[in-house]
Image (cartoon, rainbow, N blue to C red):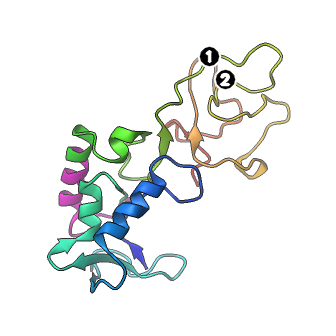
């Protein structure tokens, strides 16, 4: 099962706040908790992997909405589809962002309700160009990717969802960030 209309930083990817988000879910749904699953008639019932897409409720708490309120999840309207709680989810996300709750205060997070949660650790600040003699391109300050040639595609590298800096001097030479949202190899 997948919690519908929200996304959290993925465990095991090094994304900022992934462990904290998982712990927040455990606090909301301790082992053995009785929950009610709610389908949304406006949305798909299963994802491409066959997982049920549902809102989870524990008592009167909508867990999906509460995770967003606490800043442990972002809103993700997959393919732009908005479910029955879309307005409430957006309002909760805006408030969590404004109050810097959860991932919004702990991380540099991309705000995009039409895309997955994308976070970077705060301690990583935009870096200056790589030192002379290094083979890392400055468009990718958090990872080391050499400039062309060869021209690389996302399939050629092991990194996913990394920061891309777009400037005249650093124009994303490999075109990892096709939609120019500052995140490379999202798909």
Quick check: 109 above or below 49?
above
Quick check: 61 above or below 79?
below
Left or right: 63 in relation to 177: left
Residue at position x 71%, y 19% from top? 130
Left or right: 98 in relation to 170: left
Q: Main secondary structure of the magenta part?
A: helix
Quick check: 55 above or below 14?
below
Asked if residue 83 lies in the magenta stretch, the reply is: yes
Whether residue 79 appears in this view of the structure is no
Tell me whether the residue at label 1 lies in contact with that at label 2, contact meaning CB atoms closer than 8 angstroms: yes
Quick check: 30 above or below 164?
below
Residue at position x 23%, y 78% from top? 58
The percent coordinates of residue 163 (x first, y second) are 56, 36
* Residue 28 or residue 55, whichever sits in front: 28
Asked if residue 185 lies in the magenta stretch, the reply is: no
Residue ID for mark 2? 138
Whether residue 20 appears in this view of the structure is yes
Give the quarter of the figure containing the N terminus: bottom left
* Residue 79 or residue 34, whichever sits in front: 34
Give the quarter of the figure containing the C terminus: bottom right
| Badge nearest the viewer, 1 or 2 | 1
Residue ID for mark 1? 128
Query: Magenta span covers which residues?
Result: 80-94
Q: Residue furthest left?
A: 60
Q: Quadrant of residue 172?
A: top right
């Amino acid at each position: 099962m997948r919690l519908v209309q929200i996304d959290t930083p993925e465990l095991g990817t090094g994304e900022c706040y992934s462990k904290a988000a998982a712990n927040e879910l455990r606090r909301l749904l301790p082992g053995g908790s009785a929950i009610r699953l709610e389908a949304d008639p406006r949305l798909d019932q299963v994802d491409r992997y066959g997982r049920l897409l549902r809102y989870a409720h524990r008592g009167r708490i909508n867990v999906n909405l509460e995770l967003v309120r606490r800043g442990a999840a972002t809103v993700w309207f997959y393919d732009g589809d908005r479910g029955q709680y879309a307005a409430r989810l957006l309002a909760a996300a805006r408030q969590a962002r404004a109050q810097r709750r959860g991932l919004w205060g702990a991380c540099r997070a991309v705000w995009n309700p039409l895309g997955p949660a994308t976070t970077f650790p705060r301690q990583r600040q935009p870096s200056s160009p790589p030192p002379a003699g290094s083979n890392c391109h400055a468009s990718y300050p958090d990872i080391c990717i050499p400039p062309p040639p060869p021209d690389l595609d996302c399939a050629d590298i092991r990194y996913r969802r990394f920061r891309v800096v777009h400037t005249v001097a650093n124009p994303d030479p490999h075109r990892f960030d096709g939609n120019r949202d500052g995140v490379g190899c999202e798909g």
